[in-house]
Image: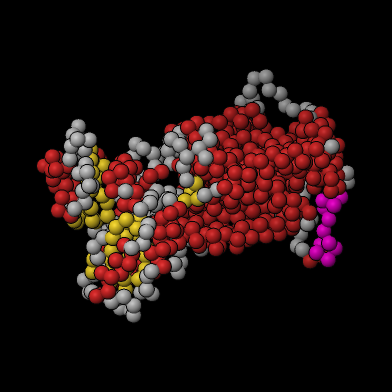
Amino acid sequence: MDRFTRGIASVAARHPWRTIATWVVVLGAVFALASSGGGGFIDAFSAKGSQSERALQLLEDKFPEATRASALVVFAVDDGETLQDQQQAVDAVLADVAGADHVVAVADPFASGTISEDGRTGYATLTFDETPAELGKGSFVPLTELVTASSTADLRVELGGDAVFLNAPDETSPLEGVGILIALLVLLVAFGTVVAALVPIGLALVAVAVGIGGIFVLAGVMDVSPSAVPIAGIVGLGVGIDYALFIVARYRENRSAGRDNATALADAMSSSGAAVVFAGGTVVIAMASLAFTGLGALTSIGLATAIVVLSAVAAATTLLPALLGLLGDRIDRGRLPLRRRPTKGAEQTGWWRFAHRVSGRPWPYLVAVVFVLLGLAAPAFAMQTAWPAAGDAPRDTTYRQAYDLLGEGFGPGVNGPLVVVVDLTVPGVSASDVTELADDIRAVSRIASVGEPQVSADGSTVVFAAMPTTAPADLETSVALAEVRGVLPDNVYVTGLTAMTTDLNGQLSDTLPLFIGAVLIASFLLLMLVFRSVVVPLKAVVMNMLSIGAAYGVLVAVFQWGWGSSLIGLEGPTPITSLIIVIMFPILFGLSMDYEVFLISRIREEYDRIGDNTEAVARGMAGTGRVITSGALIMIAVFLAFVASPVPSLKMLGLGLATAVLVDATLVRMVLVPATMALLGKANWWLPAWLDRILPRLGVESPTIVEPLRAQTAHEDQLVGR
């Protein structure tokens, strides 16, 4: 692998303008394909083979009008008044709404009886001519503006409903761009020169741009979740900067050691460049493993993130060498005042001294850190997950206001109705039995009311709603769903957002062991190939699980328990999103493996050179400590910027990722790694002889003598097939 990355870098460095032009063409081609053949973004939230999916399919085939999007115009007046007093104003609002795009029907609340018992709250159901997916993100913005502008001092008007909530445009915060500025400051401190600091950021932005273009192309061939772009973007930006940082740092280290630019670049690409390929490969494998969950939304997010990470790896191994070849000595331009080139040897650094201190007394350090990590992870055992609902949205959004008003006026179950679908074409409940079926469902203790049945035009399908007594995210609502399904014959199914999310949670529970096992096994095998060891990858898997557990524990404490939630803009405890917990696992595992690969590859390099395990660990930490810390600070800055997002799920993702990176780069890499490697000694590098013979060799090496790039033209051209 080291020869391959060196060969790729050689060609790129010798033909920099051709390489840059190729990237420009690729960027243009990707966005051209995205604009012409790229598709839209749809959340495929359905559990394959579940009852809710069968019901949806039945409605699409036999009762398509029942699958059309709907929304609720919610009206409310103050205490002491009733909506009847404002009927003229209500009628005026409904007349305006009826003329909005895609609205085909408006149910008057006075005629349909959707007025609360106290007469203060009511809602009108709007029916559209397309499904929520066909309408797409942001489609309700004009209608929202129309409805909210209708509010007066005497009549409050809000727009709500699942379709409005799910299709709301993605909200952003201006603070999200601060992460890049902080990353620039960290790079300035780490490198001490303006040019060297700008290169990783510019490279990452290009890689993310190409990757996002690829996501739009992917959306043309499969359903891609709208969340794929922000999630892939945040990960791609972090790893893109980090990968470039590791290579540039090694390149400048080689130059400081007296090597010419060509040799310094060749050595950097054969060591750090190869490590980037393996580290990126780990992230790609981890993200692609989301396909094992069987959920379309998660699969698309995994593939989208893998595309962006692949783009970051490609940029680091081709575009970066081209830029470094063009810059040459100018990489040190713009040196900051009072900053000098580092002249310390490994033995003079704090990292070297700290590694020896930990290695000298490994047990106390090991026990103390494990105790801290287990303490951070302990709250995770109390985790309760749910799916996002309008009730978790910021209070200033109209769909959250509508959600609260409906819950106060009609009970919490009105926001999460169960949709009962009867297939009259198969044996079971007949048309004459539907009334009795509705009575059976009404008799379930956790059901507040049952709506009037609606029959399809061909008479083959019946649909009606059942309102639970509890809110959509309440655990009692899932119990109510199970009780309702328990009284249904074989030709009756339950769907709706609440039923769909419950079925999705069930599928996640069933497939999670397979998904986690796939990530762990794939990562273990890849690290075993890289480091020719059984012990090193096994330790890495255990340590990464500790980091992930700590991140989950912090999320439970902050979001579920509400500890310090006001500091990140929350109004109190918020349910932890199921999808975020699942998405975080491969991202965190992949990012943790990044640092593992960079650190252990340097340790292995030193061990092969000097043969002393303790000294190799100390020198490996001395060589990578500053760079890994800088990379971690950049990741933390990028991730924490998303905590400023008004969307709770993005807050969770940002805080969870930042916590795991912080724990991994400090407690794990600085303490657990030297402590465990000191205790295990030569056993760190144990590999059975029979296994050593059959495993392919894909090591990350750093040659001590490398010919200048210009002298290797013919050989390296052959390596890349040119």
Residue under the point 34% across and 80% down: 427
Residue under the point 33% across and 42% down: 404
Residue 658 in the image, given as x and y percentages of width and height = 58, 39
Residue 320 in the image, given as x and y percentages of width and height = 61, 43
Residue 152 in the image, given as x and y percentages of width and height = 19, 34
Q: Nearer the viewer, residue 278 or 612?
A: 612
User: Height in image: 286 above or below 348?
Assistant: below
Q: Quadrant of the C terminus?
A: bottom right
Residue 683 part of the magenta segment: yes
Image quadrant where residue 638 sits: top right
**Left or right, 351 with reference to 194:** right
**Left or right, 587 with reference to 80:** right
**Left or right, 489 with reference to 375:** left
The residue sitting at the top extreme is: 338
User: Height in image: 28 above or below 663?
Assistant: below
Residue under the point 63% across and 61% down: 518
The residue sitting at the right extreme is: 611
Q: Nearer the viewer, residue 615 or 486?
A: 486
Residue 214 in the image, given as x and y percentages of width and height = 48, 53
- Magenta part of the chain: 682-692
How is the protein colored in the picture?
secondary structure
Q: Nearer the viewer, residue 380 or 180?
A: 380
Residue 373 part of the magenta segment: no
Residue under the point 63% across and 38% down: 662
Q: How many marks?
A: 0
